[in-house]
């Protein structure tokens, strides 16, 4: 009888362990915030993960800094991006297809890559 109760518990434990170990695989990517400019004009670069190359800019140059970035993209949903992430910080994310929340964003210009991604930052 105890053995019958132990088997479902072991099954649940192994299933949750598999879920945790696959957290950073599949549709989770690693990025770095390269530029945190005024009015949420952010430039990010993809560091890890296979993403559709049509979604990001393989090479993009920030004309203000005169710096070229590989695998760059702009932030498509600035209102959902954590303010605690600063330039140079690396983080994990998923592509977020949910409706973005609206917020006020000023209209000052700072160059960003033309291709933007709506992302959700996930814990490491």
Image: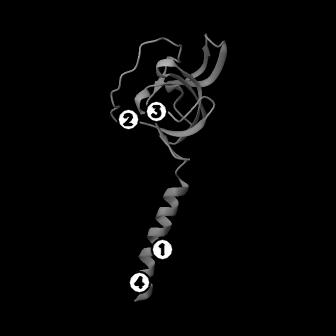
Tell me which label, 1 or 2, sits earlier in the chain: 1
Q: Earlier in the sequence, mark 2 or mark 4?
A: 4
CA neighbours of label 3 inside 10 A, class few (<14), some (14 to 19), many (20+): some
Q: Which residue is mark 3?
A: 81
Instruction: Pick whichever, 103 or 16, lies toward us.
Output: 103
Give how far apart the Cα atoms at labels 3 and 1 are.
38 Å
Quick one: quadrant of the N terminus? bottom left
- Circle 2 packing at 10 Å, graded few (<14), some (14-19), many (20+), is few
- Mark 4 highlights which residue? 4
> Image quarter for residue 64?
top right
Residue drawn at (42%, 13%) of the image: 107
Disc 1 crowd rating (10 Å Cα; few below 14, some 14-19, many 20+) is: few
Residue 110: tell me if it is visible.
yes
- The answer to whether mark 3 and mark 1 are in CB contact below 8 A is no
In this image, 117 relative to 101: left or right?
A: right
Q: Residue at x 47, y 23 (%)?
A: 116
The residue tagged with tag 1: helix, strand or loop?
Answer: helix
Which of pointers 2 and 3 indicates the residue nearer the eye? Answer: 3
Task: Report the side of 110 relative to 105 (left or right).
Answer: right
Q: Label 4 to label 3, Cα distance in Å? A: 47 Å
Expressed as whole percent of the image width and height from the top left, the position of residue 59 reads 62, 19
Q: Tell me the number on the disc at residue 97.
A: 2
Secondary element under disc 3, as helix, strand or loop, is: loop
Mark 3 vs 1, N-terminal side:
1
Q: Is residue 7 above or below residue 45?
A: below
Asked if one can make out residue 48 in the rendered structure from this viewpoint, the answer is: no
On residue 10, which mark appears?
1
């Amino acid at each position: 009888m105890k053995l019958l109760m132990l088997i479902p518990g072991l099954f649940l434990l192994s299933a949750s362990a598999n879920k945790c170990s696959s957290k950073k695989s599949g549709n989770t990517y690693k990025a770095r915030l390269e530029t945190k400019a005024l009015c949420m004009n952010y430039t990010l670069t993809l560091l890890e993960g296979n993403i559709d190359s049509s979604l990001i800019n393989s090479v993009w140059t920030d004309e203000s800094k005169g710096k070229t970035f590989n695998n760059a993209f702009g932030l498509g949903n600035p209102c959902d991006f954590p303010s605690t992430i600063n330039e140079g910080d690396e983080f994990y994310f998923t592509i977020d297809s949910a409706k973005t929340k609206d917020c006020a964003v000023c209209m000052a210009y700072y160059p960003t890559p033309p291709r933007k991604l709506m992302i959700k930052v996930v814990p490491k």
